[in-house]
Amino acid sequence: QSALTQPASVSGSPGQSITISCTGTSSDVGGYNYVSWYQQHPGKAPKLMIYDVSNRPSGVSNRFSGSKSGNTASLTISGLQAEDEADYYCSSYTSSSPWVFGGGTKLTVL
Amino acid sequence: QITLKESGPTLVKPTQTLTLTCTFSGFSLSTSGVGVGWIRQPPGKALEWLALIYWNDDKRYSPSLKSRLTITKDTSKNQVVLTMTNMDPVDTATYYCAAGDHAFDIWGQGTMVTVSS
């Protein structure tokens, strides 16, 4: 099972919005509404930010939102803050594994 | 409050078998829909899903590692155990266990495993 494709890095200034893409296939992202996003700060365990494409767990800021179109899912962070600087990973249910992660995106807040 | 904690050796030799234990609290692995999985992360690299066991003892494995992995659960002890055979230096990573149904809602702190002679 190949990893989902994410950009290696994105950046934005405080207050701006950024979007991270996660591209898969019809066997994973496109075939199921079980896409999730995780935030990972250096030396820490990942934290669930979005599940089932666009749902936020309790306690996650509403500045984080998720969406999906075809085989590509997206995570949008609005009103960027310094503490948002982290690595972000997408994950999807698949028809085979059943789970696969993306390669990760490093977000830099300028 | 849901918590998970990984335990096991920090150093294993090449060709040895790694056994990791995930001890959890705050939920039951006999509850319909719940699963506990293992994910690893080599230093400086991406997350890699390894295995998952569901409340009904359904077990799933990463296709690329399936021949080396075994996942089991002990519901009475609230534990999930992962064994990985024939360890190699490329298996050096932080190993996490995590719980959830449609996603990995809660993660353990992770345990670093180094494979070296």
Image (cartoon, helix red, strand yellow):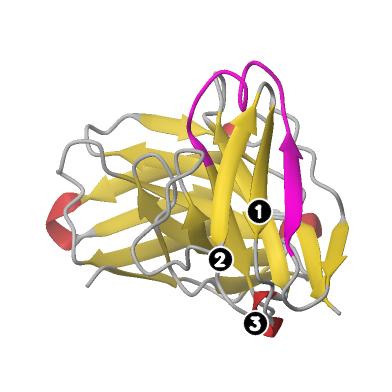
**Residue B84: where, in percent of width, then height?**
56, 49
**Residue at horizontal 69 percent and vertical 72 percent from the top:** A80
Residue B65 appears in which quarter of the rendering?
top right
Residue interval drawn in magenta:
A17-35
Q: Earlier in the sequence, mark 3 or mark 2?
A: 2
Amino acid at pointer 3: Glu
Q: Is residue B36 above or below residue B25?
A: above
Element carrying mark 2? loop
Please identify, in this view, whether the residue under mark 1 or under mark 2 is nearer the observer. Answer: 1
**Residue at horizontal 42 percent and vertical 47 percent from the top:** A55
In the rendered structure, the residue with mark 3 lies on which chain? A
In the rendered structure, the residue with mark 2 lies on which chain? A
Q: Earlier in the sequence, mark 3 or mark 1?
A: 1
Please identify, in this view, whether the residue under mark 3 or under mark 2 is nearer the observer. Answer: 3
Amino acid at pointer 1: Thr
Residue identifier under label 1: A76
Q: How many marks?
A: 3
**Residue B4: where, in percent of width, then height?**
35, 68
Q: Is residue A1 left or right of residue A97?
A: right
Callouts 3 and 2 on one subunit: yes
Q: Main secondary structure of the magenta part?
A: loop
Q: Looking at the rendered structure, which numbered label has been put on residue A83?
A: 3
